[in-house]
Image (tube, rainbow, N blue to C red):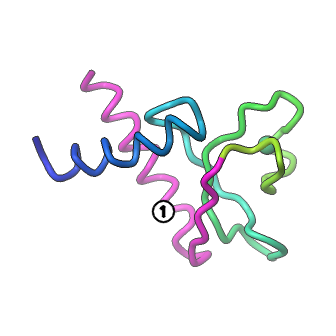
Amino acid sequence: MTGMDDARRTAAELLRQTTGSDLPEWRPTFDGVAHEPNAIAPVCPDEDHQESEDPSFFDCCPEPIIPVDPPLVEYLVALLNADRERARGVR
Ligand SMILES: [Zn+2]
């Protein structure tokens, strides 16, 4: 058991409630009005919400939306999605 496993398990309790998945895929998004992505959120499962066309955060989108300094958005999304792939591969 590593610290990462414990942390992932703690996060999974919330993420399961909000997204239905212990390990959701993450994406850049906007927290309010901004010129560039300034938050991260789980990928939206709504078929009517094409995130490639509009990455904004709407009522259809699962929580949480996590405000992030813009230079860190892509990095954190990449980290979370890489960890997701790693954790899924381990199971
Ligand atoms: Zn959505």
User: Which residue is the extreme one toward the top?
Assistant: 91
Q: Nearer the viewer, residue 10 or 66?
A: 10
Q: Quadrant of the N terminus?
A: top left
Describe residue 5's horizontal placement relative to residue 22 as left or right.
left
**Where is ligand 1, by quadrant?**
top right
User: Which one is nearer the viewer's eye here, 87 or 3?
Assistant: 3
Compared with 89, 58 (above or below) is below
Callout 1 crowding tier (Cα within 10 Å): few <14, some 14–19, many ≥20: few
Specify whether residue 36 is painted magenta.
no
Residue denoted by label 1: 75
Query: Where is residue 17 drawn, in percent x and y?
Result: 54, 37
Chain part drawn in magenta: 63-91
Which residue is rendered at x = 57% and y = 72% of the image? 68
Name the residue rendered at 85%, 51% in the picture: 54
Residue 63: give x, y in percent of width and height: 64, 50
**Which structural element holds mark 1?**
helix
Considering the whole magenta stretch, tell me its main secondary structure: helix
Q: Is mark 1 within 8 Å of ligand 1?
A: no
